Image (cartoon, grey):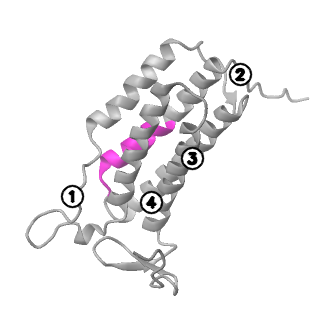
Amino acid sequence: MKIYTKTGDKGTTALFGGTRVPKHHIRIESYGTVDELNSHIGLIRDQNIQPEHKELLNHIQDRLFTIGAILATDPNKAILKSGKERLNIPKISDENIALLETTMDMMNEELPQMTHFILPGGHQTVSFCHIARCVCRRAERQTSFLNDNEPVDPKVLMYLNRLSDYLFVLARKLSHELQAVEIKWIPEKKD
C-alpha cells in the first residue's frame, strides 16, 4: 500500500463515503484536531507516569480514533442502501463518558482543594497535559461548530468536553505525584 495517493494534490480530500471536500472544511478541521490531540496524549503516555494513567490514556487514544472515524464520515452517506452503517466501529458510549467522570472523582479525592486558577506548568509532563487540554478544547469548539451545520453524535461532544476536564485533573494529579509546585494565578492589583 502506498502512503501517497496524489488525490489531494488539488486541496481536497475524501470523507468515508467518497464525498470530496476542501482540506480546510470544518469536518476536516474537527477530526484533524482530534488526531492532533491523540498525538499529544501519546506524548503524555510516553512519560514516566503511573501505569494506571498510561492504561487509561491508551483507552482514550482508542476512543479518539473512534471519534475521528465518526467525524470523517459523511453523515449523508453513513448508512448504506442496505440499512447497515458504513463503518463497523463502536460508538462513544455513556460508559466511556462515565469512566472519565469516575476517574476524575477518584483523582480529585486525593488532591488539595482548588482555591484559585492554576498557571499551566511546573513540570514538563504536567505542561504536556495542559497543552493536550487546550487542543481538546479546540477540537470541542470545532466539532460544536460542525454540529451547527451538520449533526454530530451528541456523545462525541460530551466525550470531548469531559476529556478536557479529565486532562486538567490529570495535570493536577501528576503535579501531586511528581511533587511539582502548582502556581496559583492571583491577579495583579490595579494601581
**Where 175 falls versus 57 (above or below)?**
above
First in sequence: mark 2 or mark 4?
4
Mark 3 → mark 2, Cα distance in angstroms:
20 Å
Quadrant including the C terminus: top right
Three-letter residue code for mark 2: Ala
Mark 1 → mark 2, Cα distance in angstroms:
43 Å
The local crowd at label 3, few if under 14, some if 14 to 19, many if 20 or more residues have their Cα within 10 Å, is many
Mark 1 → mark 4, Cα distance in angstroms:
18 Å
Residues in magenta, as a range: 152-164
Residue that badge 4 annotates? 31
Residue that badge 1 annotates? 88
Three-letter residue code for mark 1: Asn
**Where 160 falls versus 16 (above or below)?**
above
Residue 180 in the image: x percent, y percent?
71, 21
| Front position among marks 2 and 4 | 2
Badge 2 marks a residue whose secondary structure is loop
Three-letter residue code for mark 4: Tyr
Residue that badge 3 annotates? 40
Lateral position of residue 57 relative to residue 187, left or right: left
First in sequence: mark 1 or mark 2?
1
First in sequence: mark 4 or mark 3?
4
Badge 1 marks a residue whose secondary structure is loop
Residue that badge 2 annotates? 180
Lateral position of residue 81 relative to residue 171, left or right: left
Q: Residue furthest bottom?
A: 10
The local crowd at label 1, few if under 14, some if 14 to 19, many if 20 or more residues have their Cα within 10 Å, is few
Q: Nearer the viewer, residue 50 or 131?
A: 50
